[in-house]
């Protein structure tokens, strides 16, 4: 019997299971597992080896995700692929299109004897990229359609780290690409079994958010009540807090102002979101006349980004010019 170390979902709403597939007999067995730990496999590893798949299932909406695969054989090397990003989200690794990520590839159990089978001496590392398309989410994705970007042969037991400043998912607007990058280690084919994936891991790439403030124009003079503002938000990062703030003076990055009532939108999702908000009746946040700036900000694991801003002049003081005369 073999053991399987889990690296699956840590968040409520997910159910995890391992699927074992016997290469020589095509027998399949599923076993529900905890979010972490070690467990004996339900079936012994067959003569042709066994493939293990780690799945997590989101209950609402009902969605299945293949997190990792591993192939175990009599003399097949062991490989572990681990990806890292600046987003600590657990169930499915993710990052944003304008941020870096890295991958650790650890290979052990490689042999080097003259009589050792070729499949015990070398493995292949593949890097795949796949776009989800405009507005895509990756649900029911056919990963056989992924594009092979690079490949390399590994012949020594080692751990190597590969770092990438930006994703290579194709797209004309690099800030708006969405899809995934997958790194997989494959064994070589031999007389007992075909080439098999012994380890893999993927990271989802989500687009950079954008937004607009409509209802106020740059340099506008406000004499009476503040106008109704329409806030349009596109591709908000799944874990983000978006809000509108205002402060006295010209635009200044990093300024902390007063949050406009009704503008806070908190997301804790698995997919990017788009929204339209309407702001009205917020005059109380302006306590003096003069030049003001209104900003649309979004807070993500990567920091605070300004999506839009507008500056305007506020003059609500009513001035009365009159003459007083008397007849005596």
Image (tube, helix red, strand yellow):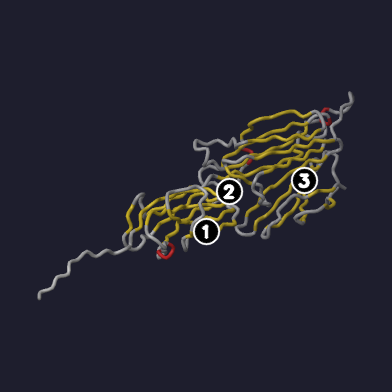
Q: Is residue 86 above or below residue 328?
A: above
Q: Is residue 266 above or below residue 162?
A: below
Q: Give the crowd class for mark 1: few <14, some 14-19, many >=20 residues within 10 Å.
A: some
Q: Residue furthest left?
A: 328
- At x 75%, y 37%, the residue is 105
Secondary element type, mark 3: strand
* Real-space Cα separation, disc 2 to disc 3, in angstroms: 37 Å
Q: Is residue 256 left or right of residue 293?
A: right
User: Which dot marks residue 87?
Assistant: none
- The picture places residue 246, in percent across and down from the top left corner, at 45, 56
Secondary element type, mark 1: strand
Q: Is residue 261 above or below residue 132?
A: below
Q: Quadrant of the C terminus?
A: bottom left
Q: Is residue 239 left or right of residue 39?
A: left
- Whichever of labels 2 and 3 marks the residue nearer the N terminus, that label is 3
Compare residues 119 and 222 and report the one nearer the observer. 222
Compare residues 297 and 257 and report the one nearer the observer. 257
- Whichever of labels 1 and 2 marks the residue nearer the N terminus, that label is 1
- At x 89%, y 26%, the residue is 113
- Are circles 1 and 2 on residues that touch, CB within 8 Å? no
Name the residue that disc number 2 marks. Answer: 303
- The picture places residue 131, in percent across and down from the top left corner, at 57, 40
Q: Residue furthest top?
A: 114
- Are circles 2 and 3 on residues that touch, CB within 8 Å? no
* Real-space Cα separation, disc 3 to disc 1, in angstroms: 40 Å
Name the residue that disc number 3 marks. Answer: 52
* Real-space Cα separation, disc 1 to disc 2, in angstroms: 16 Å
Q: Nearer the viewer, mark 3 or mark 1?
A: 1
- Whichever of labels 3 and 1 marks the residue nearer the N terminus, that label is 3
Q: Is residue 280 left or right of residue 320?
A: right
User: Which dot marks residue 265?
Assistant: 1
């Amino acid at each position: 019997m073999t053991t399987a170390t889990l690296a699956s979902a840590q968040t409520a709403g997910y159910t995890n299971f391992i699927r074992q597939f016997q290469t020589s007999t095509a027998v399949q067995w599923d076993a529900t597992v905890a979010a972490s730990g070690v467990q004996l496999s339900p079936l012994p590893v067959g003569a042709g080896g066994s493939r293990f798949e780690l799945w997590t299932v989101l209950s609402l909406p009902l969605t299945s995700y293949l997190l990792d695969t591993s192939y175990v054989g009599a003399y097949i090397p062991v490989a572990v692929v681990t990806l890292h990003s600046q987003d600590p989200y657990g169930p499915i690794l993710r990052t944003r299109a304008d941020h870096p990520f890295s991958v650790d590839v650890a290979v052990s159990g490689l042999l080097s004897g003259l009589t050792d089978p070729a499949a015990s001496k070398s493995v292949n590392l593949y890097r795949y990229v796949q776009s989800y398309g405009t507005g895509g989410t990756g649900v029911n994705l056919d990963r056989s359609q992924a594009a092979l970007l690079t490949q390399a042969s590994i012949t020594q037991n080692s751990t190597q780290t590969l770092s990438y400043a930006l994703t290579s998912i194709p797209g004309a607007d690099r800030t708006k690409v969405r899809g995934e990058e997958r790194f997989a280690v494959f064994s070589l084919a031999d007389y007992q079994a075909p080439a098999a994936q012994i380890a893999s891991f993927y990271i989802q790439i989500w687009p950079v958010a954008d937004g607009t403030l409509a209802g106020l124009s740059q340099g506008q003079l406000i004499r009476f009540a503040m106008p109704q503002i329409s806030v349009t938000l596109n591709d908000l990062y799944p874990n983000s807090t978006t809000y509108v703030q205002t402060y006295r003076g010209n635009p200044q990055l990093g300024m902390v102002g007063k949050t406009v009532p009704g503008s806070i939108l908190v997301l804790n999702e698995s997919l990017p979101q788009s929204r339209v908000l309407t702001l009205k009746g917020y005059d109380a946040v302006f306590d003096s006349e003069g030049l003001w700036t209104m900003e649309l900000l979004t807070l993500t694991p990567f920091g605070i980004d300004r999506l839009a801003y507008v500056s305007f002049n506020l003059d609500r003081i009513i001035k009365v010019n009159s003459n007083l005369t008397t007849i005596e």
